[in-house]
Image (cartoon, rainbow, N blue to C red):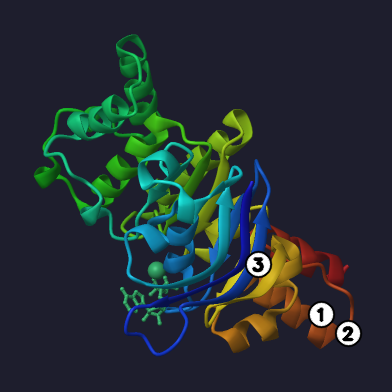
Amino acid sequence: MIELQSLTFRYAGADRDALHDITLTIPDGAFLGIIGPAGAGKTTLAHAIGGIVPHAVRGDFYGAVRVDGLDTADTRLTDLSRIVGTVFQDVESQIISSVVEDELLYGLENFGVPREEIEERMSFALEEVGIAALRHRTIASLSGGQRQKVAIASLVALRPKILVLDEPTGELDPSSSRQIFSLLQKLNREYGMTVVVVEQKIMLLCEFAERLAVLSEGQIARLGTVRGVLGDIAGLEAIGVNCPRSARFSSLLGEKTGQPVPVCVNADEAVEAARRLIG
Ligand SMILES: Nc1ncnc2c1ncn2[C@@H]1O[C@H](COP(=O)(O)OP(=O)(O)OP(=O)(O)O)[C@@H](O)[C@H]1O
Ligand SMILES: [Mg+2]
């Protein structure tokens, strides 16, 4: 379980809080999507869960964050990283090796994973992320999207209980993005990992996440099921959230016809809703 209790964080020298009085509980096994406009505090929140805030970032930290019962402020980052694995928004800063295989190996050896388990974990992660063919390539020869996949595979190999991903598909094309989300779903459902993902591709997020948290100016503006949150299109747009077209459509359809129209999270549902109204 992840527990944020009245969490406030202000970067050193900043004139306002990046996160302000956030209280949020994320149960084990959850698949939570985090959205919100630029500068809302999504990355800071992701870093607070992984302990990077406050351990590796200067600023004023108030309140408490507990992961798996451990208070992040009192737990070393190396110990936290066994529980929470984070994929940074800036993956470049995360990759330290010069060859793909070494990047995965580095984490596994650091974690003291037994030799006989290492190969199985590496091939599973490379295979699932779809980069088995890149295993012996140098990082320098990879595209941004491929590097993103390497960072994700390194984390998958370590099998932390909680995965926090900050815009993991930022450099990926639609089919790779979908592949990553399908993998996250599999890790969530089959391995019981808790997944917290910050994502701009809201259609994709809504298809896979179970719940959404909307951040606005360092605070949780909305929290609920995907459909619950998308039920208030006007409110979300006022915050600066770019809502999925299907949800905008169902909202408009309800408004124009005066009939109750359920929130549509994808194009198929939107077509079905329109069909039902036409009779
Ligand atoms: N290292 C830093 N020092 C000072 N202020 C920072 C720092 N990093 C972020 N901020 C500020 O904290 C606030 C929240 O930033 P954060 O990066 O968490 O937002 P975000 O929602 O992830 O934005 P984006 O969508 O652009 O990634 C912003 O006002 C930002 O300018
Ligand atoms: Mg960010």
Q: What residue type is labelled 3?
A: Thr
> How many labels were placed on the picture?
3
C-alpha gap between disc 1 and disc 2: 5 Å
Of residues 274 and 241, the one nearer the viewer is 241
Q: Can residue 234 be seen in this view?
A: yes
Report x, y in % for residue 238: 61, 89
Q: Say if 153 sits above or below 140 in the image.
A: above
Are the two marked residues, 3 and 2, in contact with CB atoms closer than 8 angstroms? no
Q: Which residue is drawn at 58% across and 29% down?
A: 191
- 134 displayed left or right of 276: left
- 166 displayed left or right of 119: right
Are the two marked residues, 1 and 2, in contact with CB atoms closer than 8 angstroms? yes
Q: Say if 180 sits above or below 238 in the image.
A: above
Q: What residue type is labelled 1?
A: Gly
Toward the front, the furthest residue is 74
- Reading the image, the residue beneath label 3 is 23
Report x, y in % for residue 155: 38, 38
Report x, y in % for residue 246: 65, 69
* Element type where label 3 sits in the image: strand
* Circle on res. 258: 2
Q: Earlier in the sequence, mark 3 or mark 2?
A: 3
Of residues 133 and 175, the one nearer the viewer is 133
Q: How many other residues sit within 10 Å of disc 3, few (<14), some (14-19) or many (≥20)? A: some
